């Protein structure tokens, strides 16, 4: 298994990263937290988890080992796959997710797209003894600079890649940027995830 990849960040979007190491470009699926950590950086070291399915070999990337551990804990819960775990980690940064689980906050989990009441309850029951409220995970969040239009385009593209309808995504992003025009891309996406 690949522990981490260290190299040049060739491409970075809110849902994917391409990192080049020794002449090979690796495509990694990432969360918004990881996107924030690598935003604006030319190189990086990303922790990896490989998912092998019948139809695909997927790499998931994480800025910190702790985020990867949370991802693995989430995917150990029945009914939570890798993409759902990534969606949860995009909606709730690792430190916040730890608090949600420790405080048994079912409402916060059900606000994530694709998480119903039964799945939220299963996550809380299965992970209550594996995650402690005192666990600290630093989650950096550097704002993305650029025009309002660039932020809107990137946010809509990320939401579409996460499985949302393009028209609904555009409406949500547009209304968020109307009320708060200076938001960073990851903040716009997080707000949109709660709206959609």
Image: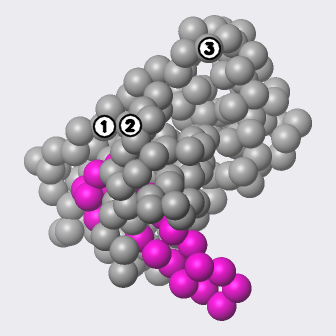
Q: Is residue 87 visible?
A: no
Residue shown at 59%/79% (left/top)?
A: 57
Residue shown at 30%/37% (left/top)?
A: 139
> How far across and down, in percent of the image, does residue 92 sit?
43, 44
Magenta span includes 162:
no
> What residue did someone put label 3 on?
146
Magenta span includes 62:
yes
Indicate the secondary structure of the residue bearing disc 1: loop
Compared to residue 97, the image places residue 156 above or below, namely above
Q: Is residue 7 visible?
A: yes
> How far across and down, in percent of the image, does residue 104 sit?
31, 54
Residue shown at 65%/80% (left/top)?
A: 56
- Asked if residue 37 lies left or right of residue 111, the reply is left
Q: Are marks 1 and 2 in contact (CB under 8 Å)?
A: yes
> What residue did someone put label 1 on?
139
Region of the chain picked out in magenta, as a range: 49-71
> How far across and down, in percent of the image, does residue 99 sit?
26, 46
- Asked if residue 100 lies left or right of residue 113, the reply is left
| Mark 1 / mark 2, whichever is N-terminal | 2
> How far across and down, in percent of the image, does residue 193 sit?
62, 40
- Residue closer to the observer: 125 or 74: 74
Residue count near mark 2 (Cα–Cα under 10 Å), binned few <14, some 14–19, many ≥20: some
């Amino acid at each position: 298994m690949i522990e981490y990849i260290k190299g040049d960040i060739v491409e970075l979007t809110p849902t994917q990263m391409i990192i080049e190491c020794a002449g090979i470009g690796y495509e990694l699926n990432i969360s918004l937290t990881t996107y924030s950590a690598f935003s604006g950086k030319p190189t990086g070291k990303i922790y990896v988890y490989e998912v092998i399915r019948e139809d695909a070999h997927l790499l998931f990337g994480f800025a910190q080992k702790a985020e990867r551990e949370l991802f693995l804990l989430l995917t150990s819960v029945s009914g939570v796959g890798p993409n759902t775990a990534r969606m949860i980690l995009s909606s709730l940064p690792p430190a916040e997710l730890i608090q949600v689980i420790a405080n048994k906050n079912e409402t916060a989990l059900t606000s994530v797209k694709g998480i119903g009441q039964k799945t939220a309850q299963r996550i809380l029951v299965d992970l209550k003894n594996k995650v402690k409220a005192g666990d600290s995970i630093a989650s950096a969040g550097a704002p993305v600079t650029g025009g309002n239009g660039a932020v809107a385009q990137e946010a809509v593209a990320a939401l579409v890649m996460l499985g949302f309808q393009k028209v609904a995504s555009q409406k949500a992003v547009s209304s968020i940027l109307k009320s708060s025009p200076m938001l960073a891309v990851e903040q716009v996406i997080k707000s949109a995830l709660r709206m959609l």
